[in-house]
Image (cartoon, rainbow, N blue to C red):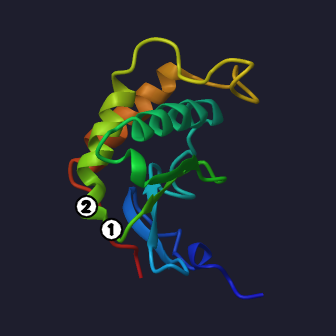
Amino acid sequence: MKKIASFTVNHLTLQRGVYLSRRDALQNGEVITTFDIRMTEPNRQPALSGKSLHAIEHLAATYLRNRNDWAGKIIYWGPMGCRTGNYLVVCGDYRPDDILPLLRDTFAFIAGFEGDIPGATARDCGNYTYMDLARAKADASRYLDEVLANPVTEYPQ
């Protein structure tokens, strides 16, 4: 089988950053853009805890889908299986620079969040107790301060 594009990225030199992962054209001509929101350096830094990543997922997805300027363009926000980051999928043809203000707002929202995590109930989530808000806030704050202030946006060769 042919390798999928994300398995051709050199994870030995991949840094934390915001990357254009892929663009897909739909039959009607619309473009779907997938971003790699890389929060840790693969194979060199510890992966995010599953509980933190789950809380980040709930908070980011809720925040993004409630922004009047982006709500209609957000298709998906979700964690990578390797727990080194997330994917953001949007309707439209975008570059990393186009979404950096949105990501800064999203991670600032997570870093400062107080209260109950949206959707963290037995009725709304299949594993609602598997979340760590304190760790999610710390991870979001670190990414905001250390990466989004001056992000890497080009995949290594």
> How many angstroms separate mark 2 from mark 1 (CA)?
6 Å
Position of residue 7 measured from the top left corner of the image (x, y, whole percent): 61, 75
Which quarter shows the C terminus?
A: bottom left
Position of residue 78 measured from the top left corner of the image (x, y, whole percent): 57, 48
Which quarter shows the N terminus?
A: bottom right
The residue that label 2 is drawn on is 98
Position of residue 114 measured from the top left corner of the image (x, y, whole percent): 40, 14
Residue sitting at 44 percent across and 73 percent down? Answer: 31
Question: Residue 123: which quarter of the image?
Answer: top right
The residue that label 1 is drawn on is 94
As shown in the figure, which amino acid type bears the numbered disc 1?
A: Tyr
Image marks 2 and 1: residues in contact by CB distance under 8 Å: yes
**Front residue of this view, candidates 144 and 107:** 107
Position of residue 47 measured from the top left corner of the image (x, y, whole percent): 57, 45
As shown in the figure, which amino acid type bears the numbered disc 2?
A: Asp
Circle 2 residues within 10 Å: few <14, some 14–19, many ≥20: few
